[in-house]
Image (cartoon, helix red, strand yellow):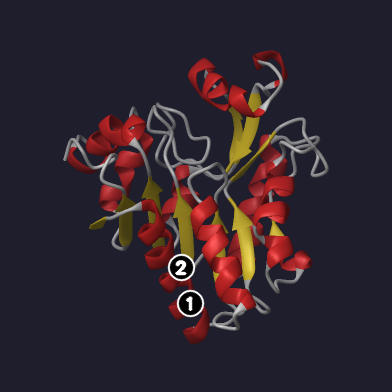
């Protein structure tokens, strides 16, 4: 695990260089993406580099970590909508090469098909991750088995409360999501992890320095052979 501590602006630039290097070496790379406020700086930098002709996504394939159950891709809080707005519509990627789990009519059986799609594409070359305040990655809440694959998740109240700021009220926040499982994430060849802000300091310490346990899902990253951890000074305060 390689740890980089810097400003959010420099983190976006440094992380983007990984994508530039990978796509120059392997233009048809398979990229795993995440949503939320944490990767917005990175996505802006990737869009800038693409517009400048420094990187192309024309042959790339993407798979997102998760999606809310009950929201279709036209809903402005769906993760498909988020990815289109913040990245896919701003770069030269083929929309048919972008994959976000379907939030409508999702079951665990259908979710398993997402893993088969990833496998058929050759596996994820570079997976982007953030972290929830309770240690979740994707929507893998504390207690999720490390052997889990893509599945339907009942969201904890703390996760729903954390995401309520994006909705008109807590009542509108979905109660379930479909998420890549921890095994799915760990199968990625390389992982970029980003955490920003003092609110993440305690859980970042547990992830990096604590026991590897399903009660802190992100702690499993200690077992991955190729993880780069990008954290700002506030998130690194307890290390």
Q: Position of residue 204 (x, y in %)?
A: 28, 38
Q: Position of residue 138 (x, y in %)?
A: 51, 41
Q: Is residue 163 above or below residue 232?
A: above
Q: Residues within 10 Å of mark 2 (few under 14, many from 20)?
A: many
The tag on residue 16 is: 2
Q: Position of residue 21 (x, y in %)?
A: 44, 79
- Contact between labelled residues 1 and 2, with CB atoms less than 8 Å apart: yes
Q: Which residue is mark 1?
A: 20
Q: Residue at x 61, y 79 (%)?
A: 56
Q: Is residue 22 above or below residue 64?
A: below
Q: Residues within 10 Å of mark 1 (few under 14, many from 20)?
A: some
Image-based side of 196 in relation to 88, left or right: left
Quarter of the image where one finds residue 206: top left
Q: Residue at x 42, y 39 (%)?
A: 131
Determine whether the residue tagged by mark 1 lies in a helix, strand or loop: helix
Q: Residue at x 46, y 68 (%)?
A: 16
Which residue is at the front of the view, 31 or 48?
48
Would residue 102 be visible to someone looking at this image?
Answer: yes
Q: Residue at x 66, y 79 (%)?
A: 59
Q: For the C terminus, which image quadrant?
A: top left
Q: For the N terminus, which image quadrant?
A: bottom left
Spatial CA distance of label 2 from label 1 is: 6 Å
Would residue 123 be visible to someone looking at this image?
Answer: no
Q: Is residue 9 above or below residue 141?
A: below
Which residue is at the front of the view, 121 or 69?
69
Image-based side of 216 in relation to 12, left or right: left
How many numbered circles does the render carry? 2
Q: Is residue 112 above or below residue 71?
A: below
Quarter of the image where one finds residue 216: top left
């Amino acid at each position: 695990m390689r740890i980089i501590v810097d400003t959010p602006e420099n983190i976006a630039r440094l992380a983007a260089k990984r994508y530039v290097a990978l796509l120059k070496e392997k233009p048809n790379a398979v990229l795993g993406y995440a949503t939320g406020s944490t990767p917005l700086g990175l996505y802006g930098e990737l869009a800038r580099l693409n517009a400048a002709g420094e990187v192309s996504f024309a042959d790339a394939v993407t798979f997102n970590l998760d999606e809310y159950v009950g929201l279709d891709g036209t809903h402005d809080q769906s993760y498909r909508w988020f990815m289109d707005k913040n990245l896919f519509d701003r770069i030269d990627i083929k929309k048919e090469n972008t994959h976000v789990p379907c939030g409508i009519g999702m079951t665990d059986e259908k979710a398993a098909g997402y893993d088969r799609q990833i496998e058929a594409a050759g596996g994820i070359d570079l997976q982007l991750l953030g972290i929830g305040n309770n240690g979740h990655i994707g929507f893998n809440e504390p207690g999720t088995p490390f052997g889990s694959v893509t599945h339907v998740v009942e969201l904890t109240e703390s996760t729903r409360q954390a995401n309520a700021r994006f909705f008109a009220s807590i009542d509108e926040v979905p109660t379930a999501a479909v998420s890549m499982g921890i095994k799915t994430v760990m199968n990625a060849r390389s992982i970029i992890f980003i955490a920003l802000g003092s609110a993440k300091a305690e859980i970042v310490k547990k992830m990096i320095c604590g026991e590897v346990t399903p009660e802190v899902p992100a702690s499993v990253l200690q077992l991955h052979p190729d993880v780069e951890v990008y954290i700002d000074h506030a998130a690194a305060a307890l290390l």
